[in-house]
Image (tube, helix red, strand yellow):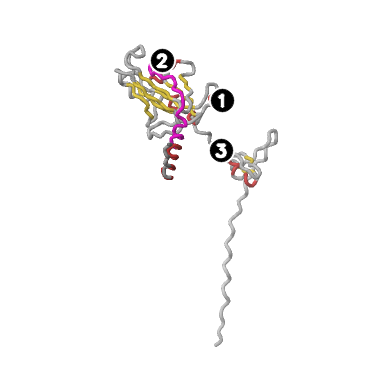
Amino acid sequence: MPEAVVAPPASVGMAGRCAALLVAVLGAGAAGLSLEPVVWHTGNRRFLAAGGYVLYPQIGDRLDLVCPGAGGAGGGYEYYKLYLVGGAQARRCQVPPAPTLLLTCDRPQRDVRFTIKFQEFSPNLWGHEFRRLHDYYIITTSDGTPEGLENRQGGACLTRAMRVTLRVGQRPGSATEQEGAGPANQTSPPPGPGPPPPRGRAVAGGAGGRGGGAAGLGGGWGGFVVATSASTTPQNPPGAAPPPPRLPRPRLPPPRPAPPPPPPPPAYYKV
């Protein structure tokens, strides 16, 4: 005889459906590839490849950064700090004041590994988030020695080209890659307004619109704006006879004072 199935309460069913939806959303980008690990050592010849060390991870992929132990890469141990930076810092081989530290290679006795998961939303508070069609960069400004571990500029990024470009959500040779992806590649602010027009020249303003420079003041009325000039003396055309010299104006004598009024007539009195 088959057993009876007891249906859970409606509240439990709603909570279960919400939990399943949350798991589906968080795990939507879980399926991905495990990319070839990046061995951070001068023995890795990919740092010297033409065009640099470039990877094309997709959302959901994983990438391991590996610092090999002493003798693991066929050479001595090298001390590095790996940072996640933007395009401007990567080109200058410079770490920002508040850097994003990924991995510290300071344990010669064993391999040190850090795994990056490329996801647009991270459930972890300290997890990294990546956007499609954007470029990210991993560099080291250390020089490989214990004394140069804390360097913030130059280092092996400058002397040994030890930096990795991560072009998230792109493909080799795609149009997005050729044009440059994301605002991380911008190194200068957009251009501002041009310089004002020189003084003493007429600048036309658009009829009912805005003109450039000083014409913007009178463009709304569709007229001209003439800047004031330092000199207003008219110039003779070439080949014309010079004007006659100016004669000084004669000075007029000062006006004479008015004569005094006549005395009043004498008064007569009857006796």
Along the viewing direction, whichever of 218 and 81 lies nearer the viewer: 81
The residue sitting at 61% across, 39% down in the picture is 201
Question: How many numbered tags mark residues here?
Answer: 3
In space, the residues marked 1 and 3 are separated at their CA atoms by: 39 Å
Q: Which residue extends farthest top?
A: 74
Q: Position of residue 112 (x, y in %)?
A: 34, 21
Q: Position of residue 110 (x, y in %)?
A: 31, 18
The residue sitting at 39% across, 15% down in the picture is 42
Along the viewing direction, whichever of 84 and 7 lies nearer the viewer: 7
Helix, strand, or loop for circle 3?
A: loop
Q: Going from the N terminus, do you reach mark 1 or mark 3 first?
A: 1
* Range shown magenta: 22-44
Along the viewing direction, whichever of 47 and 23 lies nearer the viewer: 23
The residue that mark 3 highlights is 196
Helix, strand, or loop for circle 1?
A: helix
The residue that mark 1 highlights is 175
63 in the magenta segment: no
Q: Which residue extends farthest bottom?
A: 271
Along the viewing direction, whichever of 58 and 213 lies nearer the viewer: 58
Query: Neighbour class for label 3 at 10 Å: few (<14), some, many (≥20)?
Result: few
Q: Which residue extends farthest left?
A: 109
The residue that mark 2 highlights is 44
Residue type at the position of mark 2: Asn
The answer to whether residue 87 is visible is no
- Residue mark closest to the camera, 1 vs 3: 1
